[in-house]
Image: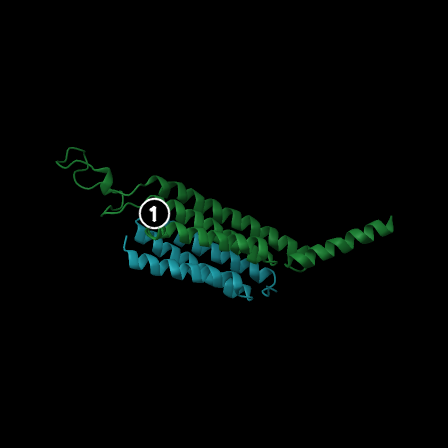
Chain colours: A cyan, B green
Amino acid sequence: MIRQLDLILLIFIVICAIAAINIKDLMSAVIILGAYGFFMCLLWTEMGAVDVAFTEASVGAGIGTVLFIAAINKTSRRSKD
Amino acid sequence: MLEYILAKYNYWIYVVLMMIGLYAMMGKRNLVKKLIGMNIFQTSIILFFVSMGVKKGGATVPILMGDSHGHGEQLIQVADYLNPLPHVLMLTAIVVSIATTGVALATLILIYKRYHTLEEDEILAIRKEASAYKTLGT
């Protein structure tokens, strides 16, 4: 566990989370949520939880983003807040 | 006191992420935004469990070093390996979270087909109007 890398990744994660809930365009918000998931993967790999990291990369960030994009294509892309 | 706070910085960031997710679930009106907040909430709990399994001082991934038949010279020290139990529990949590997201998105598509909007206040206004018409009719 390297402390500096850990802190930098945690700051990126918090920035991505705040950006994902504040952007009005839903497609951009979902893509930023995917970036948040991949930053989380990097953090877990760095903590030594390799199995959790690759499950999150394939299932959480990968399939989750695809499902979100499919649902947004079927519904509306704009959001009021 | 400050040292005590800084030593557990992972846990503090996890609390911050959890509050961001909770705010998005309660404060945002768009239903997709609520779902994004729920995802952030779940990931923060997984981060908490994974950081409970971390050990300081050169502990590595729990793969057994040395002779595979168990009669190697060196003793297996618990302090040399990370705790794998939270990792295994969180694998299940990730799969369950993607399943709940899928069901929620399917429900969102059904809601959009019926009300043609995904904003919570607009849906509530449409429902209120419909129930007012119903009481007026009878």
Residue B44 locus on image (x, y percent): 44, 50
Residue in view at x 40 percent, y 52 percent: B12
Residue in view at x 17 percent, y 35 percent: B75
Q: Is residue B5 above or below residue B80?
A: below
Q: Report the side of A12 relative to B27 (left or right).
A: left
The residue that mark 1 highlights is A51
Q: Is residue B127 above or below residue A27?
A: above
Mark 1: few, some, or many residues within 10 Å (few <14, many ≥20)?
some
Quarter of the figure with residue A35: bottom left
Looking at the image, which is closer to me, B10 or B68?
Answer: B10
Residue in view at x 24 percent, y 38 percent: B78
Residue A14 seen in the current view: yes
Residue that sits furthest to the front in the current view:
B1
The chain holding disc 1 is A
Looking at the image, which is closer to me, A22 or A64?
Answer: A22
- Which quadrant is the C terminus of chain A positioned in? bottom right
Residue A7 locus on image (x, y percent): 34, 58
Secondary structure category for the residue under label 1: helix
Residue that sits furthest to the left in the current view:
B73
Residue A78 locus on image (x, y percent): 59, 66
Quarter of the figure with residue B67: top left
Residue in view at x 45 percent, y 59 percent: A34
- The amino acid pointed to by label 1 is Asp
Residue B124 locus on image (x, y percent): 70, 55
Residue that sits furthest to the right in the current view:
B138
